[in-house]
Amino acid sequence: MTAAAQGRIVRLAETARRAIRFWLDGQELRALEGDTVLTAILLSAQALRDAEFGPERRAGFCLMEACQDCWLWPETGARFRACSTQITKGMRLRSWPPGDWPASGEGQA
Amino acid sequence: MSGAARVLIVGAGPAGIRAAQVLCAAGLRPVVVDEGARAGGQIYRRPPEGFTRTPAELYGSEAAKAARLHDTFDRLVADQALDYLPGASVVALSGGVAQVLAGGCIRSIPHDRLILATGATDRVAPVPGWQSAGVYTLGAAQIALKAQGVALGRRIVLAGSGPLLTLLAWQLRKAGAGLVAVLDTAPLGTQMRGVPGMLARPGVALRGAAMRARLGPLYRAGVTLEQIETDGNGPVALHWRAARGRTRATACDMVGLGWHLRAETHLADLAGIPFDYSGVWAQWLPRADSLGRAGEGRYLAGDGLRILGADGAEIAGRLAAIACLQDLGLPSPDPCADQHARARMERFAEGLAHAFPWPAEMVRRLPGDTTICRCEGITAAELRAAAARGGAEANRVKSLARVGMGRCQGRYCQLAAAEVIAAAAGISPEAAGRLRSQPPVRPVPVGAWLAAPDP
């Protein structure tokens, strides 16, 4: 499996934490407890989601909750910022909005 | 009665923590609202529970200061000396009431006095291609290293100017990250002009110079950034021009950008505090007296007032709290020593600002197809056209071209936009004006206003 080699992020320290599993677009991935969702995803992927206003992809920008670049959708529930949300065991995430978004509204956790 | 004064502190970095400490010592019980999951702010940001690197590994020469600050706040929380809301954002201020987003709900926090310690973000200048995934702020790369123990790429180029450029480069190298170039847009001659001011804190200046020296040939000064070349995944090379004019391309998969800091002032604006343009800092800064008093019952502290760094923020936090106690007619510590120290911090900081300036010329000459607003993909050409059609004023251009209306609400585009507008109209960025802040200052799900907060 080459997924790990394709990740954008590289671990440099703090590797002795417990491993957990989560799902992105139906694919099972691994992270460590204490990883943010952004860290967890970008260890195996190049981006979090597509941009709404251009052809490029998005992978976060400021990591301090100011730029609003890293919004992501869970399979059920409201959008959140991947830089400031910790990954949890069994989390199911999607890199594109729900089909009826924004007609469905958001924030209906 | 004054003993029951309700004081709201926004931010639990060095400034907010020291302000809280002074108020608690005077017998008040402030409410502290902070976006972080753990107090400390960005510079002394703490990793999540379960991480094991020591303060020395995380904060280097500043480890003892960081540990003292964390300890001070943890004790105040443990002693129940204050009300602490972590992971919470003040999104609006009006009529002595703060609207706070916490846990998916909006709750109202009425207060008599307000201390804003909202810090700063990186100040970024657009570079063609910067909208791509894999381009980050310098602060982002530092947060990733500190709070997660990760590097945001395998071949990293850092570009921009300011103290964080050198510090982060040194931290990444020490941690074993793949750093391939450190490109400073400030020419060495310009940097020398800041030296007299920086001598106000010779120890700090020397530490910076030593870090810089250890970067060796990775570090280049006087660079002009031309383009971030990207493929579908992200950056593949940064194209830049050396001081002597030769064009180079450095292969990379991550670019970190930052030109010193931008004061985070959205809430100060909503609080009705006036602003002045600072030529030294090339940005609008809120107006306050030497203690941080900025109007009736309003106080500012830390980088959101003046960009003095963490040490200056601790001082400013104490001073703002002292001003608050004075205005309440309560006994307060003598501010003289802190005011004196703050003046020294200001001389040093102005030296830094002169040495590592905002790259105005580079921004003014950006090609028309360069994205200025990353949120909505608005280009320099669209801004120039809007300025020509509707007038060279930041808020008019915002109305016509939507720059500053995206999700970041202008935090990462407004300074560059003002520069582009000013250049197009032949006026100064000051004359192009300041974007007015609008509540909510963070995106808020509509449902958060409908949901009742937990009892």
Image (cartoon, rainbow, N blue to C red):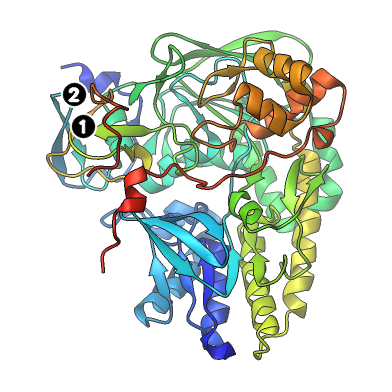
Q: Quadrant of residue B246?
A: top right
Q: Which residue is tagged 1?
A: A93
Verify CB contact (< 8 Å) between mark 1 and mark 2: yes
| Residue count near mark 1 (Cα–Cα under 10 Å), binned few <14, some 14–19, many ≥20 | many
- Does the rendering let one see residue B200? no
- Using the image as rendered, state which of residue B28 and residue B393 is in the foreground: B393
Q: Is residue B393 above or below residue B452?
A: above
Q: Position of residue B30 (x, y in %)?
A: 49, 76
Please report, as a chain letter, where disc 2 is located.
A
Q: Is residue B17 above or below residue B352?
A: below
Residue at the image point whose x is 68% and y is 38% from the top: B435
Q: Quadrant of residue B378?
A: top right
Residue at the image point whose x is 35% and y is 29% from the top: A9
Q: Position of residue B98 (x, y in %)?
A: 50, 62
Report, in whole angstroms, how far the alpha carbon at label 1 lies from the one at label 2. 6 Å
The amino acid marked with disc number 1 is Leu
Q: Which residue is tagged 2?
A: A25
